[in-house]
Image (cartoon, rainbow, N blue to C red):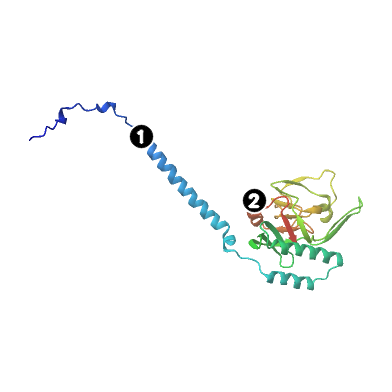
Amino acid sequence: MSVFRPDRRSEPRDDSSDRRQFPRPPLWLNLTVLAVALAGLALAHLHRKSVHENYADVLAQRLRTPDEVNRMKESLAEMDLSREQLVRELEGRKEMVEALSSDGFYLSVDSEAKTLRFHYGGTVLREADLEVGPPATFEDEASGKSWTFVPVKGAFPIEGKIADHSWRIPEWVYVMNGEAIPGERPVMRHGLGRYVILLPHDYVIHSPPAEGSPLDGPKPGSVMIDEADLRAIWPRIHRGTKVYIF
């Protein structure tokens, strides 16, 4: 018995024009997507490299130890301080010890070691040499005015920061330099320094004054550090950031 098999070759086929077709994307679009992807990978690599270089000390976690506290105690024991000064020193150092275990940025100024340290919690991110303006009292016989500057000590919040500012020369600068106070005091760009951190009672942490400024060196009673060091920590310093000065 033979089985009848229909000849499917004789059946009509679907017209290929009826089938749904998706056009291929143009070559320029493929190349654009590829270029964007490669650029993203390159930027991500550069960002990781930058973070690693800028915060290598953070990643290394060079944590402070009880030796730091002991060093503070020994330093206090060697100081010749009045009762009021000792209270300020103790309170400031107590707050700093507490800050060692915190999560936040702050500054410490070691007047004895002439070193400024930029901290994140217990980790020192950067160290810089500093100069402390000596204590001084200036008196102007003509006006009867006087100005007294004593090196600031204790714990303080930053009151503000200014950069690229113009400084009106204060009266005490002329008295300090043995000059008569002019009726109209001039304004000098970067006269106090390109970067200035404002502390309470008119004290500052500043970069070196511009060439030609009547202030040569640190402001009396205040702190001066190199411009490059201050510029490096500038983005992390804000109003309210704590400064511990000993």
Left or right: residue 1 versus residue 225 is: left
Q: Quadrant of the N terminus?
A: top left
Query: Which residue does the numbered mark 2 point to in the structure image?
Result: 235
- The image position of residue 116, as x and y in percent, is 69, 61
Q: Amino acid at mark 2?
A: Pro
Query: Is 139 drawn above or below residue 25 in the view shown?
Result: below
Q: Residue furthest front?
A: 1
**Closer-to-camera residue (170/107):** 107
The crowd level at tag 1 (other Cα within 10 Å; few <14, some 14-19, many 20+) is few
Mark whose residue sits in front, 2 or 1? 1
Query: Is 136 drawn above or below residue 34 in the view shown?
Result: below
| The label number, if any, that marks residue 146 in the structure image | none
Q: Secondary structure at mark 2?
A: helix
Quadrant in the picture for residue 54: bottom right
Which residue shows up at 52% across the image and 51% down it?
Answer: 47
Q: Do we see residue 171 in this rendering?
A: yes
Which residue shows up at 67% across the image and 56% down it?
Answer: 105
Left or right: residue 123 versus residue 17 is: right
**Closer-to-camera residue (123/196):** 123
Left or right: residue 218 versus residue 35 is: right
Q: Quadrant of the C terminus?
A: bottom right
Query: Is 199 drawn above or below residue 92 in the view shown?
Result: above
The crowd level at tag 2 (other Cα within 10 Å; few <14, some 14-19, many 20+) is few
- The image position of residue 153, as x and y in percent, is 79, 61
Q: CA distance from mark 2 to mark 1?
A: 46 Å
Q: Amino acid at mark 1?
A: Pro
- The image position of residue 5, as x and y in percent, is 13, 32
Query: Which residue does the numbered mark 1 point to in the structure image?
Result: 26
Left or right: residue 30 versus residue 180 is: left
Q: Secondary structure at mark 1?
A: loop
